[in-house]
Amino acid sequence: MNIILFGAPGSGKGTQAKLLTEKYGFDHVSTGDLFRYEMSHNTPLGIKAKEIINRGDLCPDDITMGMLKNHIVSHADSCGFIFDGVPRTIHQAEMLDDEKMFDTTKVDMVLYLFVEMEEVERRILRRAQIENRADDTPEAIKVRVQNFFDQTMPLVDYYREQGKLVQVDGMRTIEEVFGSLCEEIDQRLA
Ligand code: AP5
Ligand code: MG
């Protein structure tokens, strides 16, 4: 089973993906984490991505999906993937649906963590005091949220039309949100 965890920056995708991975044994793949790994190792890809990510913009689709493909190929024995932060544009979703590019990763469901924008900002600014992400500044958060509305939100209709979208109220506690996500997954597995 392959699941997309969909939601705005700071909506809880990473938090929930970790919990779901522990429970179901999925492979959690976050393109944000993959980019941060590349940046921390100063690879050519990381150097190229750094400026884009730090200002809050999206990295080019071909680079992002190429990186994702490498991850999938090197985790071929996975029982299923949780895609966190990818796809993020219609073009990325079409690439993921293209069997010539991604033949083993048919998307089964898209879990949309709905969180209000004021809460998103509060959560990211709170995280900024604990972690040290260069894109967790007020300026970059504004750009990230705007990009989410402009480039990523169209995916809601894209996956709704495919009958795969499930919206979950992400404004509750971590445990409550997790409970709802598990219910949805268990229903689909049954
Ligand atoms: P990415 O790393 O994916 O960042 P993001 O989507 O902006 O999301 P975050 O990781 O900030 O938030 P999250 O939803 O994971 O929330 P979290 O669980 O941490 O991407 C970073 C950048 O990389 C992008 O801007 C782009 O440049 C590039 N990139 C990545 N993927 C790309 C792609 N596909 N295409 C192009 N470019 C791409 O939670 C946030 C905080 O809230 C935490 O502190 C957490 O503890 C807390 N929290 C979580 N849930 C709750 C709750 N229920 N109640 C209270 N607090 C909570
Ligand atoms: Mg994250």
Image: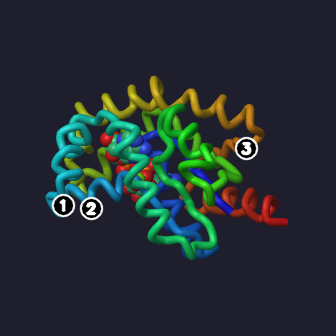
Identify the residue position indicated by label 2 in the image: 37
Indicate the colouring scheme: rainbow
The N terminus sits in image quarter:
bottom right
Position of 19 relative to 131 (above/below): below
Q: Which of 9 and 59 lies nearest the eye of the viewer?
A: 59
- Residue 58: quadrant of the picture: top left
The C terminus sits in image quarter:
bottom right
Q: Secondary structure at mark 2?
A: helix
**Residue 113: percent from left, percent from top:** 58, 45
Identify the residue position indicated by label 1 in the image: 40
Q: Secondary structure at mark 3?
A: loop
Residue type of the residue flagged with mark 2: Tyr
Identify the residue position indicated by label 3 in the image: 164
Left or right of residue 8: residue 185: right
Q: Which of 79 and 126 lies nearest the eye of the viewer?
A: 79
- Residue 74: quadrant of the picture: bottom left
Residue type of the residue flagged with mark 3: Lys
Write the residue at 31% across / 50% down: 126
**Residue 157: percent from left, percent from top:** 66, 29
- Residue 70: quadrant of the picture: bottom left
Say whether disc 3 or disc 2 marks the residue closer to the N-terminus: 2
Count of picture labels: 3
CB of mark 2 within 8 Å of CB of mark 1?
yes
